[in-house]
Image (cartoon, grey):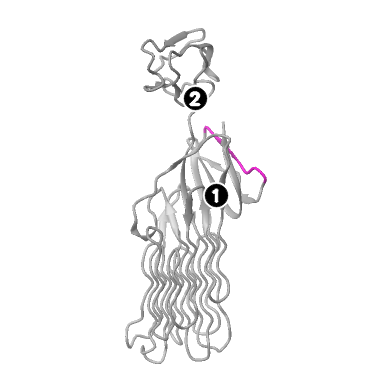
Amino acid sequence: DLPAGSAGDQVAIVDYAGTFDSNACTLAPNGSEKIEGIEADYTMETERQAAVLTYIDGTQGWLLTSAAPDPGLTPPSPVINYLVVAGGGPSGAVNATNNPGAGGAGGLRSTVTATGGGGSLETALTVDLATNYTVTVGAGGSGDSNNGADSVFSTITSVGGGAGVGITDGAAGGSGAGGGTEEGAGGAGTSNQGYAGGTGNRTAGSNYPAGGGGGAGAVGGSPANGAADGGAGGVGVAVEITGSSVYYAGGGGGGAKANPGAGGNGGGGAGSTGTAGTAGTANTGGGGGSGGATGVNNSSNGGSGIVILRYSNTFTISNPGGGLVYATPADDGDFKVASFTSGTGNVQWNL
């Protein structure tokens, strides 16, 4: 660690053993002091490197005033925590006598609090300064059989939610869709992103209840024989990346002639007894709730996804070329949080 600085103080460092290339020297500022104007560690990693640092003031802290053979003070690399939620799947379309499966939630991958499918937390990404990284916010699925769209941050892809494809088996996805009432099986979820949908049940009285869509936190509900209720949507996952605990990626509720299933906490739409179920909530990745047997094509849409990135407030973020919608990143004094709500494009970090 560097000592507490007073204006004019100097510190000299030299690679006496010639090993900085394999055993880098890390310079850490004292407390909240700065090096080159930043509250961050720097490294010297060139063989036989030497440097003189001079303390200037509280704004800039220690500045490099002499160096050989090169400065070698490597800026810190940004470490990015993330939440990547894909678009939710839509419910299936109804026919005159049966209820379609509900939409599955979009896949959820997170480095904070919890991730989808009961998996282990993802690993934060270390990125390079002034380098483009792709961000895509997946749209919710619409119409019968169209899964939600994937969401992406760099190498991280969350899979779109499964669509409730009519009255038989639900589609696989980030979380799987519920099965329709012709004993349709729930679609499979994606490992470490979400759960399977519930199974529909034609024999459950005269209500013909459909299975609920899977959520990031639980399997969609399956109506039991003789039960009147449509399957509830699987619950989503609560993530605290913005500083508050917010649920994302709930499955849609299954339709029924009398008692439809509730949508899963995290933007899942509720099932219906009549026309369309409730659409998944925008920017949650919630699955669409399925409708009742009315003889019309009335699939409900899945909710769009979201990408949220959390990083040290030492850095700024930009969207070279545009294409992404996001607000000015919130700054809590230590970290900034950027929430991307639609579009596709590149982001990069700079000092």
Q: Secondary structure at mark 2?
A: loop
Residue at 44% x, 72% y: name it.
177
Which is more N-terminal, label 2 or label 1?
A: 2
Residue 212 image position (x, y, % from top left) = 42, 75
- Determine crowd level at label 2: few under 14, some 14-19, many 20+ residues with C-alpha closer than 10 A: few
Q: Which residue is mark 1?
A: 339
Q: Main secondary structure of the magenta part?
A: loop
Residue 324 image position (x, y, % from top left) = 62, 51
Tag 1–tag 2 contact (CB < 8 Å):
no
Residue 244 image position (x, y, % from top left) = 45, 50
Relative vertical location of residue 109 with respect to residue 198 in this rendering, above or below: above
Q: Nearer the viewer, residue 245 or 14?
A: 14
Residue 155 image position (x, y, % from top left) = 48, 48
Identity, as a three-letter code, of the amino acid under mark 2:
Thr
Question: In whole angstroms, how far apart are the C-alphas of marks 1 and 2?
Answer: 29 Å
Q: From this viewpoint, is residue 246 visible?
A: no
Relative vertical location of residue 169 with respect to residue 265 in this rendering, above or below: below
Q: Nearer the viewer, residue 311 or 18?
A: 18
- The quadrant of the image that shows the N terminus is top left
Residue at 38% x, 72% y: name it.
220
Asked if residue 320 is among those painted magenta in the image, a careful observer would answer yes
Q: Which residue is mark 2?
A: 74
Q: Which residues are magenta?
A: 314-321
Relative vertical location of residue 335 with respect to residue 273 in this rendering, above or below: above
Q: Secondary structure at mark 1?
A: strand
Asked if residue 123 is among those painted magenta in the image, a careful observer would answer no
Apparent side of residue 126 relative to residue 349 in the rendered image (left or right): left
User: In the image, which disc is placed on residue 114?
Assistant: none
